[in-house]
Image: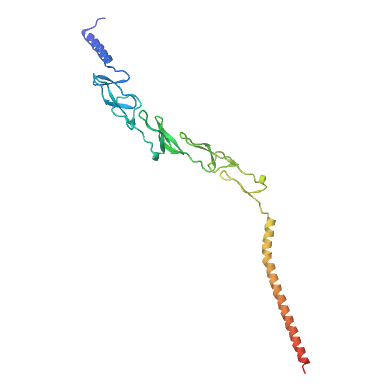
């Protein structure tokens, strides 16, 4: 195969370029700046002054901030803030080598995670009357609710529905049937005969009282008439005996 002069120049340029790239490639823990391969700063610090041909990179510690990996940055990252207004609290405080880790407040669960830290939280679902708590809520998962079956009930705060009370076991009658949100009501039923007797007695008492009062008045009136008659007879007799 015959190569032209043009081909030879192209091959030479590619070869020289590869050599240049190899010479300029920096190590994994280095970064290139001003054609120099400078050592990166360790986690927990940042670059204060880049290296030169004669001086290595100058690094300084992070203050109220962090870097979690070797870096060529001139500033550290700001620490995340766990906003209680967003339902968050601090789980792990920020250090020079790690960011703040947030978690939900009590009674809430995380709805969004970023790099292992919660960034948004919401309240656990509250089960309604007629439901029971199938699965309690955690910091990572919402609560789960399920419906009570017939013959059981719950006000929504129970982890298992309660069975309806059997009134006959208590020697009582069922006054009101139970539902999925309330128990049955037990008591003693009043039969019709008892009701009739009570009503009859209540009606009879005032009638008897009226009769007694009338008889008493009638008796008093008769006694008064008899006394008047006796008194008149006595007066008449006295007149007859008087000369």
Q: Is residue 181 left or right of residue 228?
A: left
Q: Position of residue 162 (x, y in %)?
A: 59, 41
Q: Position of residue 234 (x, y in %)?
A: 76, 86
**Please, is residue 95 above or below residue 150 in the view?**
above
- Furthest residue toward right: 241
- Furthest residue toward top: 1
Q: How many marks?
A: 0
Q: Nearer the viewer, residue 101 or 167?
A: 101
At 41% from the left edge and 37% from the top edge, which residue is drawn? 88
Q: Is residue 64 left or right of residue 231?
A: left
- Which part of the image, by quadrant, shows the N terminus? top left
Q: Position of residue 99 (x, y in %)?
A: 37, 31
Q: Nearer the viewer, residue 62 or 11?
A: 62
**Please, is residue 238 above or below residue 147 in the view?**
below
**Please, is residue 207 above or below residue 136 in the view?**
below
- Which part of the image, by quadrant, shows the C terminus? bottom right
At 78% from the left edge and 92% from the top edge, which residue is drawn? 241
Q: Nearer the viewer, residue 2 or 79?
A: 79
Q: Position of residue 98 (x, y in %)?
A: 37, 29
At 72% from the left edge and 83% from the top edge, which residue is drawn? 228
Say which quarter of the image contains residue 17: top left
- Furthest residue toward left: 5
The way the protein has been coloured in the rendering is: rainbow
């Amino acid at each position: 195969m015959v190569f032209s002069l043009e081909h030879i120049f192209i091959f030479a340029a590619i070869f020289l370029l590869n050599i240049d790239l190899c010479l300029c490639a920096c190590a994994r823990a280095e970064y290139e700046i001003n054609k120099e391969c400078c050592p990166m700063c360790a986690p927990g610090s940042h670059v204060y002054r880049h290296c030169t041909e004669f001086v290595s990179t100058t690094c300084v510690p992070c203050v109220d901030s962090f870097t979690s990996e070797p870096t060529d940055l001139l500033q550290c990252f700001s620490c995340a803030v766990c906003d209680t207004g967003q339902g968050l609290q601090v789980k792990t405080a920020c250090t020079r080598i790690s960011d703040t880790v947030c978690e939900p407040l009590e009674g809430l669960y995380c709805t969004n995670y970023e790099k292992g830290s919660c960034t948004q939280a919401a309240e656990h679902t509250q089960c309604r009357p007629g439901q029971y708590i199938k699965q309690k809520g955690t910091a990572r998962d919402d609560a789960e609710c399920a419906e009570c079956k017939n013959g059981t009930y719950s006000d929504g705060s129970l982890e298992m529905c309660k069975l309806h009370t059997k009134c006959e076991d208590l020697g009582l009658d069922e006054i009101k049937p139970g539902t999925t949100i309330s128990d049955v009501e037990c008591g003693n039923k009043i039969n019709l005969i008892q009701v009739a007797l009570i009503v009859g007695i209540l009606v009879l008492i005032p009638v008897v009282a009226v009769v007694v009062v009338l008889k008493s008045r009638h008796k008093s009136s008769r006694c008064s008439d008899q006394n008047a008659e006796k008194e008149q007879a006595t007066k008449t007799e006295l007149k007859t005996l008087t000369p």
